[in-house]
Image (cartoon, helix red, strand yellow):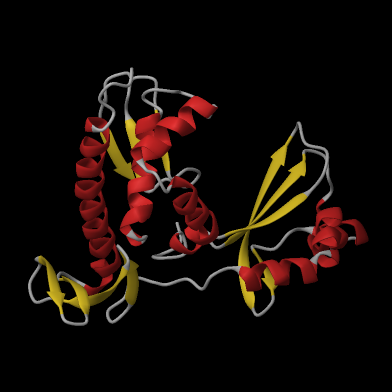
Amino acid sequence: MAGPLSLFRRRAALPDTWRIGAADWPVVLTRRAGTRRVTLRLCPLTDCLRISAPARTALADIRDILDRHADALAAQSAKLPPRLDFREGARLPFRGRTLLLARAEGVRTVWRDTETGPVLAVGGRPEHFARRVRDALLKAAEAELKAETAAAVARLQGVRARPLGAVRVGDTRARWGSCAADGTLRFSWRVILAPPDILRYLVAHEVAHLAEMNHSPKFWQVVERLHPDAATARAWLHRHGSALHRIGPAR
């Protein structure tokens, strides 16, 4: 028979999910030796509740903190844009237009431009639909980003800069883009979901790092040379970027 102490420990343990508003959020607890307080964050990319806590904080104390911050977490959840899954019939933002997702016969991926907007039709097994959509969007983003990068590098003529390395496109979480010391540029494919001017700004930002590996006034001068309306595009990405991360399956 379990004693009072073991019963308390079971009650104190964190569950796999935590009810926030009307939804159950998977719990991810990370212990950090260097931190002094418990922080709570709803991750819009993975649809989970991330908890960072000192190494010795008792689980019962973490539960108490979660209970005390129930209203704040519910408010945070309500502010998140709804998730837009890759499913047949879904409509996604795409280069300033609305993209319709459809099923295609066979296994080919087909892009069509119609009077009502672009259509992406993918074939294959239904369970592979989301992956095929993501692959098609990544491929489209890669082509657009490489072409825009080449154009931006050409506009750098007369500016002392390191040579352009490879251009990589993936599903980055922390940054929309980055520039490595060897000239390799990396971008998030999700920028293809934004209006074209936002993609051009992102490319200009990273290409400018080929000349200035910092965010000094000189760096921003190069950005403005490559993209004169950079401030407006940067503000758009700050306001709407989180919504782009809510498109497609949680990851």
Q: Quadrant of the N terminus?
A: bottom right
Q: Quadrant of the C terminus?
A: bottom left
224 or 15: which is nearer to us? 224
Residue found 31% across the figure and 57% down from its top: 196
Q: Is residue 185 visible?
A: yes
Residue found 62% across the figure and 76% down from its top: 23
When the figure is inspected, residue 141 is found, relative to residue 85, above or below; the finding is above
Q: Is residue 103 left or right of residue 81?
A: left
When the figure is inspected, residue 58 is found, relative to residue 93, above or below; the finding is above
Residue 17 in picture, x, y percent from top left: 64, 66
Residue 215 in picture, x, y percent from top left: 53, 29
50 or 92: which is nearer to us? 92
Residue found 26% across the figure and 45% down from its top: 145
Residue 241 in picture, x, y percent from top left: 48, 57
Residue 19 in picture, x, y percent from top left: 69, 72
Residue extending farthest right: 4
When the figure is inspected, residue 24 is found, relative to residue 251, above or below; the finding is below
Find residue 62 and report its image quarter: bottom right
Residue found 19% across the figure and 48% down from its top: 143
Image mark count: 0
Q: Is residue 1 visible?
A: no
Q: Is residue 85 left or right of residue 127?
A: right
Q: Is residue 105 left or right of residue 11?
A: left
